[in-house]
Image (spheres, rainbow, N blue to C red):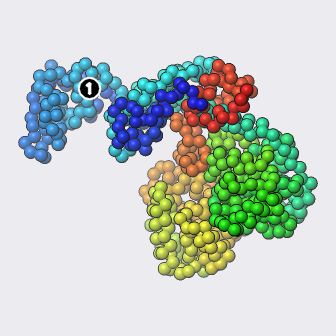
Amino acid sequence: MRPEILFPLFTPVSTLQGVGPRLSSLYEKLAGPRVLDLCWHLPVGMVDRRYAPTIEDAISDRVATLKVTVSRHIPSPNRRSPYKVICHDHTGEILLIFFHARGDYLMKLLPPGEIRIISGKLERFGDTLQMAHPDHMVPIEEEADVKTVEPVYPLSAGVTLKPLSKAIRASLALTPAMPEWLDESYRAQESWLSWRECLEKVHTPLSDDELTAFSPFRKRLAYDELLANQLAISLVREQQTAAKGRIIKGDGTLRAQMSDILPFKLTRSQDKAIQDVIKDMESPNRMLRLVQGDVGSGKTVVALFPMLSAIESGFQAAIMAPTEILARQHYKTLKPFAEKLGISLVILTGRDKGKARKVILEAIADGSTQMIIGTHALFQDDIVFSDLALAVIDEQHRFGVHQRLSLAKKGAGVDMLVMTATPIPRTLMLTAYGDMEVSRLTEKPAGRQPVDTRTVSVERLADVINGVARSLEQGTKVYWVCPLVEESDKSDLAAAEERYRELAERFGDRVGLVHGRMKGPEKDAVMEKFSMGNVDLLIATTVIEVGVDVPQATIMVIEHAERFGLAQLHQLRGRIGRGSEKSTCILLYQGPLGETSKARLTIMRDSDDGFVIAEEDLRLRGAGEVLGTRQSGLPEFKVADLSCHGELLATARKDAKLIMDKDPLLKSERGQALRVLLYLFERDTAVKYLKSG
C-alpha cells in the first residue's frame, strides 16, 4: 500500500484550485495527471524582477519593477493605434502601451490617481521611457509578491506561464515534510537540505547556477531518484536470485557436436561469455546474466551453447525476440544446426493462429519440442512449457522488466540470459541492468572489415543514386534507409514510399520496400527476395535496425542521417559489413547542421566501436534520448540526468548495496523512510518483492 503521507501528491491535478477540466487535460499532456507530476516539472529559466529603480534611473532593455502613480489614460483613436496610460513617480514619467486593449478593463486595473506596482521590460523611444503590456499591474500591498525571481517553465500548446506557475505553487503547498531516507553522514558531507526544502528551492531559483543539473538542490533530488532506482533493482535482483534455481549440467555431447559443425572459430570473448553462462547455469542459484555485444559480434551463437546445455539436461530452452523479422532470422540461423543435431525446433509468433498454433502449443506443453523461438507471443497466458530451464531474451531494451519476469515464471527456477546489440554506456547499464551479471563481446568475428562511412550533403543526391546504379550493375545489394520525419508512422511511411516510387521508376522491380505498417508475411516476403531473390535495392524505415542479416548487402544509404541518434545510426550501419567484402555507409545530411548533429556525424565517420559511440551519444543527448527511453524498458528519470550525475549513481549503487546487507527487509527507521522513497518515485513493484516477515 502507498504510504498515507504521499496521498496528497498522488491526487489528480484537477483537484487544485483554479484548475478546471480544460487546464487539467493540458497539464496532463505537459507534465502528467497528478499533483506530483507538476512538482517534477522543473523550471528551465527565470525572470528577475528585483531590479526596482526610479523612472529617472531606469535602464532600458531590462525587466524592472516600478512603483508609480497613474496620471491619465489616452484611449486609442483607431484599432491600429495603441491604448496608452501615462504614469509617474517623483523623478519622471513612463508610458504604458497596450495593443487591442479593452479600456474599461484597464481603467479598473489602473485607476487614475492610484499607486500601482508595474513590472515588465523597459524600452526607450527618444526621451520617452515605455513599457508595453506589463506582466504585472497590482496594488502596492502586493509589491513583495512581484519583486522576486519568477521561474520560467517549459510550456506546450495552450499552456501559459501564469496559470501554470500558480498550479505548481499550489502543488508544492501540498508536499508534506518527508522522513529522511538519506544516510545522515552523507547528507551532512554534501551539505544538502531536506527533500522538501530542495524541492522548494529548485522551483524558486535565484541565479542561473541554480537552474543547472549541478545545483546542490537538484543534485539532492537527483540522488534521491537514483537511490530509489538502485534500491529497486537490488530488491528485484534479491527476489530473483533468492528464488530457488536449479543445477543445469549437461553432458556436453550436443555442445561438442556443435563445435565440430560450426563453420568458424569462436572469438576469445565469445568463448569467455559461453563459459560464464554455463558456470552460472551449473550453480544452484538462478542465473540473471546480460551478454552485451556490439553489432555483428556473434551473440546468437553465444546463446546457442547454453541452450544446448539445457537440452542435454532434458529441459527446454526458449529465445524471445522483439520483432517477427528478428524471430524468423533466429529461426533461419538455428534451423540447419538443429536438424544436424537432431533437436526439434519451433517458432511461435503472433501470426500463428488456429490449428497451426494449437499444434505448436501442444508440442511445447508435452515437451516434444526442445527449442522454442518466439516474439512477445511466448509470454501469453495460454502458453505452457513442459519444463523450461533457460529463457534467452534478445534486444532486452525493447522489453520491460515485467516482461522479463513473466517469461521467467513459465518454469521452475528459470535461468535468464539477456542479450543486447545496443552498446550501453556504463551509467545506463547500472540504471537498467544493475540487477544482472554482465559479459561483454568485444571482438568481431574473423574476416570482417570495418565499414567505410562517409558523410554526403543531400544536394549530391543525384550522384549518390548514380553510385548506387553502378554498384547494382556489379551485383551488390543495397539498403536505403528513410528517416522518421516526425514521431508518426504516417510521415515515416510517406518518406519511404516516395523514395521507393522514385527509385522504382529507374530500377524497376529490383527495388523493394519494407516498413512498420506492413503485415508480417508481406515483410518476410520482401526480406526473402532481398536476401535470396531479385530485389537488390531495399528501401526501408528503421524496421531493419535490429538483427537482419544479409551478408551480400555491402552498401547502405541513410537519408537525413542528422535526424537519427548515434546508437540508432550505429545499429543501422551494423546491417552491412557482415561478410568479407568491403562495405560502404553513406550518411546523407541536410545542411546547415547544428553543433550536436555535426559532432554526431563526425563520430560515426571516425569510429565503429559501439561502446565509444554510446558514451558519446550519452554526452551529446543525455540519457532520456539515448535509447528512446519510452520504448526501451529503461527507467525514465524526472530529475536525474545521467550525463551529469554519473558520480551520484555510483554512490547510490554503493548505498543500496549497504542497505541490502544491513536491512534487506527495510524494517529499521531508515528502512521505513526508504519505503516512502520507493513509492515516491513509483518503484512500487520493488516494494512488493520485500519478503514478508
- Residue 130 seen by the camera: yes
Is 227 rendered above or below residue 337? Answer: above
Residue 191 drawn at (x, y percent): 55, 20
Name the residue tied to disc 1.
Answer: 65
Relative to 470, 259 lies left or right? right
Crowdedness near tag 1: few (<14), some (14–19) or many (≥20) residues, C-alpha within 10 Å: many
- Tell me the quarter of the image containing the N terminus: top right
Towards the viewer: 616 or 75: 75
Give SS at disc 1.
strand
Question: Callout 1, which amino acid?
Answer: Thr
**Residue found 50% across the figure and 49% down from its top:** 596
Q: Quadrant of the C terminus?
A: top right
- Furthest-left residue in this view: 77
Q: Residue at x 60, y 45 (%)?
A: 634
On screen, residue 66 above or below 464: above
Indicate the position of residue 238 as horizontal and vertical percent values. 74, 35
Provide residue 403's location: percent of width, then percent of height. 66, 48
